[in-house]
Amino acid sequence: MSDGRWRAAGRALWRVVAVWSVSTLTMLALAGILPDFQLQSDSGDSSTRIAMTAALGAGAFGLLSALVWPLLVRALLLVPALVLGLLVFFLNGSLLLLALRLNPSGRGEVAPETAVVVAAVMSAVASATGGALAVRDDDAYRRRLARRADRRRRRGAEGGGPTTPGTVFLQFDGVGHDVLLDAVARGHLPTVADWLGPAGAAAATGEAPAGSSAEGAAGTHRLSSWRTDWSSQTGASQLGILHGSNHDIPAFRWYEKDTGEVMVSNRPASAAELQRRAAERTGDRGLLAQDGASRGNLFSGGADQLALVLSVAARRGRRNRSRAGYFAYFSDPANAVRTAMSFLAEVARETGQSTRARLSGRRPRVGRGGLYPLIRAFATVVERDVVVAAVIGDMFAGRTAVYADLVAYDEVAHHSGPRSQDAYKVLQRLDRSLALLAKVAEHAPRPYRIVVLSDHGQSPGETFRTRYGLGLTDLVRAGCGLPVPRRARRTHSGAEARATVRAALHRSVEADAAQHPGRRPREPIVLASGNLGLVSFPDVPHRMSQEEIDRRHPALLTTLANHPGIGFVLVRSETDGAVVLGAGGARIPLARLDEEPGPLADFGPGAAEAVRRTDSFPHCADIMINSWYEPKEGEVLAFEEQIGSHGGLGGDQTRAFLLWPHELSDPLAGRGELVGAEQVHRVLRRWLGEPAGPRVPVGPRRRIRGLRTPRGTGAPERPNTPREHST
């Protein structure tokens, strides 16, 4: 063995001894503090005997954690991730009880509830000690990474390993282009700032054009914005990015008349069906079909390596490998305890932040109680840790293409605001994850290019209900003459809607209900996706026309179009085709929107194209409603209980970002702007072949009935060419 390896082995042995010693001291301290934990017999023992008992107990606990813990985690893979995180403490406590039972001195004793506390503290102290030693010995850390990379390279060389660069696509969910620049200017994203260089910093401070694709010319990366579709949400954007088509995705949730089902993008069954439809439309498996990995995403992208992928979460049996990432991460008890403690700390952080917001009277504000602190902690801690660890494993394995979604910012920004300090602190932690991946790339068995992008942004603003005292469903029901809650009737909007109904019907709503007590009203289905609302009439099999809606509910469209909280309404007319309705009787056919934007004027360039494309979808709702938008402040009114929202048109939500290394080609390629997730897919697909990179296999255009299409078809490789839309 070489001198270097002997020194490395000596350092490793020193760390084991140090961790064991600290664990022994921790056990002794806890035995002196906790009344239900003892390391001596009832008649008393010498100090040496007690120390020996503690040392043996700490050693047995460490050994069991290393050997038994991975088996326990594998057995619990079917347990929901949130439950698994909470079970960490109890499993650790059980291992401590077992360690004391195996102690040959037979003097250790602890109450079960105390064992949980003792085990958690010991694991945390051991993890912190080991981490501190590794951080202090930076050279050893680098050598350890290099050795792992060398082993991967040797194994790859034996089997003809990869010689071309791999690509990691890291999605910062919900981070808008301007929010990213603002965070860089405030110093929250030092890694991104270093990548952009001085030119990127100039763009962040407004000294250079923010939309230019040459912003980061002095750094290692360049930055550009891209414009989302009307449905500015993860389901539509990520399906388009990973699978090349987001056709017929009108919103985050929508009603399909042909099946009678409500589709929800983050529901496993819906995600699987949407992925199947996209694969059928494009004729190939997706962006990650060749040696790819999908981590923390809604869709697989055709990857074979999956972790926390929603579209396969509903599968049963051996083919569901989505939860394998949990095992890879939680099989290390130090990881498990560290993440569990961070989880509890995040719950406490959210509780404190929401309490301060409430006591200070901050506006706008939404409720953040119930299960939300646990949901936030899962998104910002568990999901982040597991996904980053999985990506690190992919890089050391030398995989060709990796796409990972980090949802932490999006979750916090919904409830705290997209430019709040709470959200920016989450971005700081994501930047540290980015720095870690960049460090890993230096020791990976192949060169890696790291591309960072977002799927949409978020627009601020109070909720529709907060401003007007009633929700969109209440307003639609009032416009239809249907019963609404008493609180909604008392609002100005509710009273105005009912007055409009009475004027249109020339009779009171109550009188009509009294004359037909046995007739059940045909109630519409009202769904919300951020500041985008959808109204569907389930008893009509086709998309209802404006004329049909007016005959059934004469006051509904007038009520919606003239409401101050609504920007515009899209319906289909029997005479003029699709039309946009606005306040003051505005009625503009889609064909004339370019010359006469009317209510779409404030929504900026591209709004007309986005509306036209959605109108062409088979499952476009009978009535599509976009909320009011204030261009100066960039505010919208969410139909959901969110003060940072996305899903429709208006503000930062439609302006995502793309950050890529210099060696890759310009994504704009002569265009003024990237428009739509499908164009982003084509850019990422092109990058996978540059320079001398992997080719993504594309089979012949055909109908795919399932997602088990074998990799490759033997057909000549060619660029993916899904059907174009109007943009």
Image: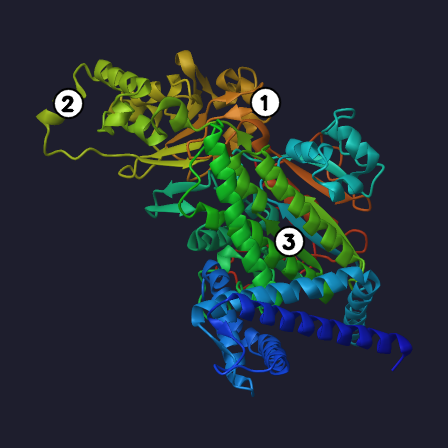
Disc on the earlier residue, 1 or 2: 2
Labels 3, 1: front one: 3
Residue designated by label 2: 510
Instruction: Please tell me which residue lies in front, 642 or 105.
Output: 105
Residue located at (48% from left, 41% from top): 249
The vertical placement of 8 against 398, above or below, is below
SS at mark 3? strand
Asked whether the residues under the numbered discs 3 and 2 touch, taking CB atoms below 8 Å apart as contact, a structural biologist would say no
Three-letter amino acid code at the position of disc 2: Glu
* Numbered label tally: 3
Three-letter amino acid code at the position of disc 3: Tyr
Residue designated by label 3: 403
Instruction: Please tell me which residue lies in front, 87 or 722.
Output: 87
Labels 1, 2: front one: 2
Question: Alpha-carbon distance for marks 1 and 2?
Answer: 43 Å
Instruction: Please tell me which residue lies in front, 585 or 455.
Output: 455
